[in-house]
Image (spheres, rainbow, N blue to C red):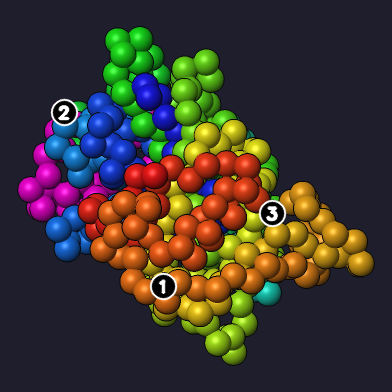
Amino acid sequence: MSVRVVVGAQWGDEGKGKMIDLMSETADIAARYQGGANAGHTVVIAGKKYVLHLIPSGILQKNTVCVIGNGVVIDPVALIEEIKMLESMGIEIKGRLFISHLAHLIMPYHKMLDRAREKKAAADKIGTTGRGIGPAYIDKINRAGIRIVDLLDRDTFEQKLRKNIEEKNELLKKIYKAEQLAVEPIIREYLDFDKLINPYIKDVSLYLNQAIKAGKKVLLEGAQGTLLDIDFGTYPYVTSSTPTSGGACSGLGIGPTFVDEVYGVIKAYTTRVGMGPFPTEMGDDDLVNLRELGDEFGATTGRPRRCGWFDAVIANYAARINGISAFALTKLDILDTLNEIKVCVSYEYEGKRITEFPSEMRILENCQPIYETYPGWESSTSEIKKFHDLPDNAKKYIHRIEELTDTGVAIVSVGSGREQTILV
Ligand code: IMP
């Protein structure tokens, strides 16, 4: 591989952090292309847990250079905190992290607006992470955003910031009846970010294009997942960016002709956080408690994740939208103790069978999942290193997923550690 995209094939939290960390071992560069500090990539190395929100998990591999593309919205406070956290753990950052000069900044008013909008929406809320993601992308599309490059020109930066804060204060006051921001302290605080961020700023598109032409191995890392995509996800219960593979090119400034393969990371069952339809969701009184078994609590917000069975309609859709070359199947070990495992193969709506993912929320909210039930393997897989050593029922489960999605499973993860990985 020279250029590989890694995408989430469900609603995020598929275990991309671990996969990207592993794949970065053989990559020269790991590049993040969308989202912001709403993401939470958890990586466990030698029993030590690292949670990264903005910086690609490749930073944990000594020789990998990490870049953050123009498609990412960067909260400078979160970025500096993350750099400091990694440095305090002995990880070298200088010269190994580059940030696109074209990336937009998340400001305190974006976070306030995010929370105020959610509060006002009450029962209709999206269930966002409250990290200011939606409002920052609104400003970007509205041509009112502030970019990293603006940090380099203090006068323009101050002017833009002042204008934005004044406008957002009007919104906070009149529409959301929320607390307003004091202009001067923010200007003072943010004007100083130029010094801290300056060493990392780069023309990422130019850097990546040159690296690819020089034969470097590059990993393009998506955050969130296919079903949270602004176009192809369960709109409006989505994030405000393009986590699907197409976003990798526009979020980094490289052409699609450079992409060699797309890996879809998919969990052996399904989870989502936030609101919105979820056909295979289990009820609280369900006998299987995947949340406890899989420790399904958000890495960014700590919110309990909603859990359900594997949904092949979604997996198929993700394979199509992203052009997935192979799946990396994660958290198989979480199913180890179950005596029965279900797979949703299609939906039923008003007496009709649906096999393609429906775009109408009304259908998705009211359809019934049609399940196939398989016997569990009821033994531990977490120490297994080779595919043929997996219990027969686990192999059958994986092969059925491959059949239903017409996509091969190339990697199986059976635990959070780097070593708990089976290359098929
Ligand atoms: P936002 O990205 O904070 O605007 O949130 C929009 C939706 O995306 C909400 O349902 C969030 O829970 C969901 N979301 C955002 N980031 C992640 C993630 O990293 N994993 C899972 N869900 C996420």
Bin the neighbour count of mark 3 within 10 Å (Cα to Cα): few under 14, some 14-19, many 20 and up: many
Q: Which quadrant of the structure image shows residue 361?
A: bottom right
Disc 2 packing (10 Å; few <14; some 14–19; many ≥20): few
- Nearer the observer, disc 3 or disc 1? 1
| Mark 2 or 3: the one toward you | 3
Q: Earlier in the sequence, mark 2 or mark 3?
A: 2
Asked if residue 82 lies in the magenta stretch, the reply is yes
Disc 1/disc 2 C-alpha distance (Å): 43 Å
In the picture of the structure, the residue carrying the numbered disc 1 is: 336
Please name the residue shown 42% across and 76% down the image: 378
| Left or right side of 350 for 20 | left
What is the C-alpha distance between the residues marked 2 and 3? 43 Å
- In-image side of 317 versus 250 (left or right): right
Report the amino acid beneath label 2. Gly
Q: Quadrant of residue 72?
A: top left
Q: Is residue 63 left or right of residue 101?
A: left
Q: Which residue lies furthest to the right in this view?
A: 351
Which residues lie in the magenta part?
A: 68-97
**Image quadrant of residue 333?**
bottom left
Would the CB of label 1 be found within 8 Å of ligand 1?
no
Cα separation, mark 3 vs mark 1, equals: 23 Å
On-image quarter of the C terminus: top left
Circles 1 and 2, Cβ within 8 Å, touching? The answer is no
Image: 12 above or below 208: below
| Coordinates of residue 34 in the picture (x, y in percent) | 47, 39
Tell me the kind of residue under disc 1. Answer: Asp
Q: Residue at x 12, y 44 (%)?
A: 91
Name the residue nearer the viewer: 302 or 317.
317
